[in-house]
């Protein structure tokens, strides 16, 4: 094995990952382009402004323009990034979610609050039953250890390696196949990664300052008010332990929200919305979340909060991208003697 190619059980992982990425992207492609696209996933999550909150990008947004690879890549990059204004719009929409979707926000806060109130029992069950079921499972690293040593790469977990590699391979496939959808998905997913880091890790963790759960919570018999040498506790109500602003991973006071769940769900939401596929992106997110499952050290409410925040991040990115594409979409409920349904229309 060479020093820069990782192998696992005789398989060249970079080549294997590229093959898997091509197959998955091919499988995720819609069967045919539709002039009146329909989206089923998310229709049951109503928006305060009408229609559904979880909206994808229609297939019709990716018509063949006849551009060569470089022309298309340049245009797609500009449309997906959106410049300074595009990034500002993304952050504004994420921050404005409570005002724009007060019902969804209220339901999310109430649900997470209920979990916090029962976090000792729920997380103890999670540690005993869920974590134990996946204990010992960890995705193999394909980044050579000498590249990680004494570089910023040492802060990237094995699970992050796969997520970032998946995004990179999506873009490589998109450029090689001159596929606008794949290129846009990769760039939007990259924005989701960056936003998740800034919002969850840099901004929100210090605000909550929550201590992480002690290992083997069941052995404490209840939420005892104690903190071990690592800064872990069996008391789920230990908030307000300001850890400072940390750009690097740190354990103390950084339980809520889970950065990795924010990351996984924001990227999964982007892929799901771009390919109108509610299965593959979340299966991948689930696989990443159970790899090295005991290394997360989170209360269950931390993970749920991260998933909610990640979904909001991903959906905000999709919505603004749709606006920059100049697509005018509407969603109209339909009630007739034949039944109840909905009509989704688009003008561009």
Image: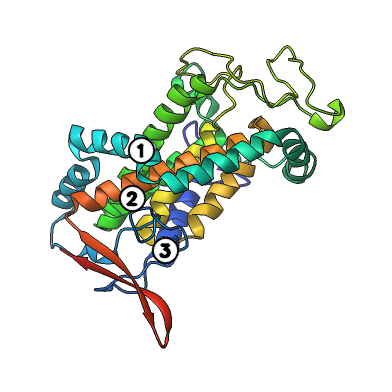
Q: As displayed, is residue 313 above or below residue 33?
A: above
Circle 1 sits in a helix, a strand or a loop, which is it? helix
Q: Residue at point 24% right, 73% down?
A: 35
Q: Please count the marks in the image.
A: 3
* Neighbour tally class for label 3: few under 14, some 14-19, many 20 plus, Cα within 10 Å: some
Location of residue 99 (image quadrant): top left
Q: CA distance from mark 2 to mark 3?
A: 12 Å
Q: Residue at point 39% right, 62% down?
A: 276
Q: Residue at point 19% right, 35% down?
A: 85
* Neighbour tally class for label 1: few under 14, some 14-19, many 20 plus, Cα within 10 Å: many
Identify the disc placed on residue 282: none
| Colour convention | rainbow
Q: Label 1: which residue?
A: 94
* Of pointers 2 and 3, the one earlier in the residue sequence: 3
Circle 2 sits in a helix, a strand or a loop, which is it? helix
Q: Measured from the top left, where is residue 302 in percent x and y?
A: 59, 34
Q: Label 3: which residue?
A: 28
* In-front residue for pair 285/157: 285
Q: As displayed, is residue 211 above or below residue 7?
A: above
Residue 320 lies left or right of residue 6; in this view the side is left
Identify the disc placed on residue 185: 2
Q: Measured from the top left, where is residue 151 in percent x and y?
A: 46, 19
Q: CA distance from mark 2 to mark 1?
A: 19 Å
- Asked if one can make out residue 1 in the rendered structure from this viewpoint, the answer is no
Location of residue 68 (image quadrant): bottom left
């Amino acid at each position: 094995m060479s020093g820069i190619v990782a192998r696992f059980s005789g398989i060249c992982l970079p080549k294997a990952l590229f093959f898997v990425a091509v197959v998955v992207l091919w499988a995720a492609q819609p069967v045919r382009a539709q002039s009146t696209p329909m989206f089923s996933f998310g229709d049951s999550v109503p928006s305060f402004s009408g229609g559904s909150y979880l909206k994808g990008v229609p297939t019709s947004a990716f018509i063949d323009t006849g551009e060569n690879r470089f022309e298309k890549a340049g245009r797609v990059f500009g449309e997906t990034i959106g410049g300074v204004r595009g990034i500002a719009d993304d952050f504004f929409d994420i921050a404005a979610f409570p005002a724009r979707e007060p019902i969804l926000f209220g339901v999310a806060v109430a649900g997470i609050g209920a979990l916090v109130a029962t976090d000792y029992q729920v997380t103890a069950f999670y540690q005993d039953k869920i974590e134990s079921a996946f204990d010992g499972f960890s995705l193999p690293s394909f980044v050579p250890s000498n590249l990680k040593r004494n570089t910023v790469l040492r802060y990237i977990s094995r699970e992050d390696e796969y997520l970032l590699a998946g995004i990179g391979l999506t873009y490589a496939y998109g450029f090689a196949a001159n596929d606008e959808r794949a290129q846009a998905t990769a760039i939007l997913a990259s924005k989701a990664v960056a936003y998740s880091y800034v919002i969850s890790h840099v901004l929100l963790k210090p605000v909550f300052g929550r201590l992480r759960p002690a290992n083997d919570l069941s052995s404490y018999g209840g939420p005892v008010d104690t903190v071990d040498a690592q800064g872990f506790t069996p008391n789920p109500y230990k908030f307000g332990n300001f850890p400072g602003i940390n750009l690097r991973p740190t354990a103390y006071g950084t339980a809520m929200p889970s950065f990795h769940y924010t990351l996984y769900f924001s990227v999964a939401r982007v892929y799901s919305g771009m390919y109108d596929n509610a299965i593959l992106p979340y299966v991948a997110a689930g696989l990443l979340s159970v790899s090295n499952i005991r290394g997360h050290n989170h209360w269950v409410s931390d993970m749920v909060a991260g998933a909610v925040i990640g979904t909001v991040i991903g959906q905000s990115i999709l919505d603004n991208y749709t606006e920059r594409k100049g697509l005018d979409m509407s969603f109209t409920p339909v009630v007739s003697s034949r039944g109840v349904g909905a009509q989704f229309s688009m003008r561009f």
